[in-house]
Image (cartoon, rainbow, N blue to C red):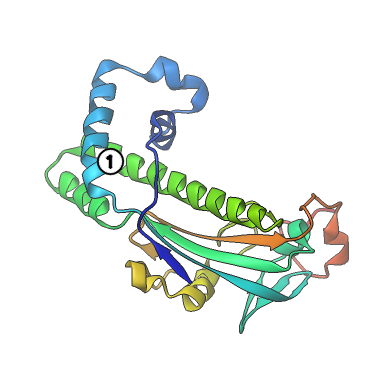
Amino acid sequence: MQVSNELIFTIDKQEVYRYLGIPKQLFQSSVNPEMDSLFERGVEMARDLIVPVAIWDRFDISYLQKSVLKFDKYSFNTCIFYRRFHHASQVILSVVSIGGRLEEHVTQCFNNNEYPLAVMLDAIGSASVEDLAGGVEEMIRNKASEEGLFTSNRLSPGFADWDIREQEIIFKALDPSVIGVRLNPSFTMIPRKSISLAILIDAQPFKPRDNTCNECDKAGCKYRKD
């Protein structure tokens, strides 16, 4: 298991605006001096409030078929891994976070009726943790490449048919409490600006398969492809 708080992230203006509800195609026309000033103020504050940290570990996969992936003493119940990465031999689990200080400041801004700044800071936090997760994904990909291995893209509980409740399995396998992240009763993470992820590894490159739903007998799956 590895823990790092020496992680690099960027605050991408266009991504922040996307979290504010401004799509990419409207970005240029939506920028104005007042919003720009608020963004710059938010970035300056966020750099003192964000404390990036990550924990990750690597596990051998003992079973991967249809809707089950087993590793160590745990198992995930989702068809997404087999459907996309059926020959994977290992899985890396990770939790990344920007800490809770920015979130606390957002709450303080709302309490002080500084609504525009609060919303801007919240969007900056969302964009930052997403960039941080992307950076961890790239780091894992580079390390695997040095070993002559290939990686999948990252996936997180709550995506497709992967039940959000299986966040609990990731937390049991990693114990992210050592980096200050915990689960609440609804299986969402605290601090909220945190992301859990899984990346699969194998000696063969991952290629999209044809309709593997034909091999699966999971009844009533809304993600099934006929």
Task: Give coordinates of residue 178: x percent, y percent.
Answer: 35, 72
Which one is nearer the viewer's eye here, 181 or 188? 181
Give left or right: position of 168 versus 110: right
Q: Which residue is mark 1?
A: 121
Tell me if residue 95 comes above or below residue 209 in the rendering: below
Give left or right: position of 204 versus 51: right
Q: Secondary structure at mark 1?
A: helix
The quarter of the picture where residue 19 lies is: top left
Question: Looking at the image, which residue is at 26% across and 42% down?
Answer: 47
For mark 1, does the 10 Å Cα neighbourhood hold few (<14), some (14 to 19), or many (20 or more) residues?
A: many
Task: Give coordinates of residue 216: x percent, y percent.
Answer: 83, 67
Question: Looking at the image, which residue is at 62% across and 63% down?
Answer: 162
Residue situated furthest left in the rendering: 112
Task: Give coordinates of residue 114: x percent, y percent.
Answer: 16, 38
The quarter of the picture where residue 144 lies is: bottom right
Question: Looking at the image, which residue is at 22% across and 35% down?
Answer: 44
Residue situated furthest bottom in the rendering: 73
Which one is nearer the viewer's eye here, 142 or 105? 142
One can see residue 163 in this view: no
The quarter of the picture where residue 194 lies is: bottom left
One can see residue 100 in this view: yes
Task: Give coordinates of residue 45: x percent, y percent.
Answer: 21, 40
Give left or right: position of 114 versus 148: left
Which one is nearer the viewer's eye here, 181 or 32? 181
Tell me if residue 188 comes above or below residue 52 in the rendering: below
